[in-house]
Amino acid sequence: MHEMLKRLRSKNEFWLAIVLLGLVVFFSFTAPAFFTIGNLNDLLTQNAFTGILCAGLIVVLIAGGIDISFTATASVVQYAAVTLANMYGMNWIILLVIAGGLGAIMGTINAFFVVKFRIHSIIVSIATLNIFYGLLIFITSGNYITTVPDYFYDGINWLEFQLGRRSYGINLQMVLLFGSFILTAFILKATNIGRQIYAMGGNPDAARRLGFSIFRLNLFVYGYMGFIAGIASIAHAQLQLNVTPTVLVGRELTVLAAVVLGGASLMGGVGTVLGTILGVSFLCVLQNGLIILGLPARWEGAVTGLVILIAVAASALEGSRQMNMRRASRKGQEAGAAA
Amino acid sequence: MILLRHTNTQLSILLVILFIAFSLGIDRFFSIESAWSMAIQVSGLGILSLAMMITLLKGGINLSLIATTNLCSLTMAYMINLLTPGAEGLALIGGILVALACGAFVAAFIGALNGYIIAYLNVSPILATLGTMTLVKGIAVGLTAGNVLSGFPEAITYIGNGAVLGIPFSLFVFVGCAIPLAIWLSRTPTGMFIYMIGSNEKATRYSGIDTKWVIFKVYLLSSMLAWIGAIVLMGWLNSARADYSESYLLITILAAVLGGIDPFGGSGKVAGLVLALAILQFISSAFNLLGFSPFLTLAIWGVILLAAAALAIKTRSLQQN
């Protein structure tokens, strides 16, 4: 039992879960409107876009890369997909397939430059962010799309029930949010590709020598990120009921912060779906709780920033404490052996 | 042929080709007015790019750069509006100096915070500056509620728009930052240590250099350059706001990488950055004169970044063979 606690304590997820739980308990007692079905519904719906993107970015970080172009990908896909939907009708399934497919194609452009030209992914994705976004605004002149197909207004409502004056149910945002995380977890845990992604992120040279196709793996990783960005853009469009091409770009660093808070390393090979879920939940619960508590919305950023800084500093301190302990115990063993 | 493989030579050739092509092809490109507006536009971005560059050289990054710039200019704008209205002579000068000092203090504080977290707590620079970026911008938005502060005395707008000998004053400020920085990086021990840390931090530490102190100084200096950039930008725009020039963040990285600075540290020169800035500015001004959307310029810059990075990697592998 003691051993198990010790092992748990060294896990990032354990600490995040404790802090998240503390946050939930705190807000539940201080803000009566926090711990309600209505607020849970709002939390999931409002933050679905960010959350879905986290499910894609974690795969890229584990693979040892980074991508910040996904908000531009999402903007382009959103515009194209809703335009097509307005022209041809379609339905949710076809729309999602088109959005995911287009996003995946755009994502693989990143992979192509990362592998074939050996340019680091941060540079590639800074470039593609500007190219995708620049061309989108150039071609559309930044105009809104104000009409969406009828089925956007209906959305989807599964397992609907009435509570007070509002009715709740499983909406499109929740389906896509849970679906994305389940898909990512399945890929990382249960497939051969998932194992190869961890291996490539941990040690790309070894992975290459083992005969993994680095190009195909990267095509999959960045393609998956693009696919997820496409899906996220539809969740966002259905919530807003319009398309504004300029609102998504600029959110990429928030998504990155959430995933890295969840324990993913920027060096690759490290990260879990559970950690990512805890990381993004933590940021979203914090912002949501503070607003319900009555903190003016304009102070939201300052508090979020402060919490990110405290979290990364604390986890760095915990990391160096563990390293010191390991070093001390090794020294102790050596001293024991010498005696 | 060996000369051709040098990044700065390649950039110079590209710059000359662009200059000749644009001068011949576009009516008003080769004129005093366009040179003037180019010089003013490049100065503010240039100072911020220098601030980004030194963190890249040591293998880090400063994502809080633009947030720092904006909080500095807001602080200075607030102090100026508090102290200078109605003031004349010495009181006016004193008020402006106090305002500038307050901005410097804010910049130093943010720089020291970044430096401490990155150097002494060993937090990755992306993560640490992502945190300070969110915090600093959050403070700026919280205090101003997103409002604009504007209306500055002539001394401030002169820094952004004035001229000395027919040359924009802000260009002198940029050159006044770039040349000392270039000398500092190439001719002083600390400058050399920055390159060494950028190529191998552990080896540098084991050779007896106080790497933590050097890293701390890099982030402090980056922040102080952001403060100078803030003065130039607020003078140019005659206003300050929490979310001004946010697109500059990625453009400073783009300019640095195009200028041959290794984004993982260890190599790169100020001269390369200056050439890259000139190329980006030529393209932006030419497209502006041609009436293209600034967003098309953004896309073209992205294409150039990819091409430059691909070319740099090809040249390096040629050199190794």
Image (tube, coloured by chain):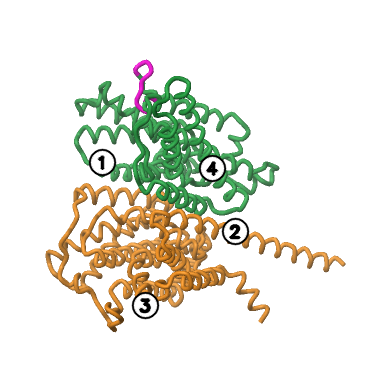
Residue hosting label 1: B294
Picture colour for chain B? green
Cα–Cα span, label 2 and label 3: 36 Å
Q: Is residue B165 magenta?
A: yes
Q: Position of residue B281 (x, y in %)?
A: 32, 33
Tag 3's secondary structure? Answer: helix
Tell me the subunit letter for badge 4.
B
What separation in Å lies between label 4 and label 2 (alpha carbons)?
19 Å
Q: Which residue is mark 2?
A: A316
Residue B204 colored magenta?
no
Frontmost of labels 4 and 2 is 4
Q: Give yes or no for contact between labels 3 and 1 (Cβ–Cβ under 8 Å).
A: no
Front tag of 1 and 4 = 4
Label 2: which secondary element: helix
Of all chains in the rendering, the one displayed in orange is A
Q: Which residues are magenta?
A: B158-166
Say above or below: B96 vs B196: above
User: Which residue is pictured at 27% across the width and 77% down the height?
Assistant: A166
* Amino acid of disc 4: Gly
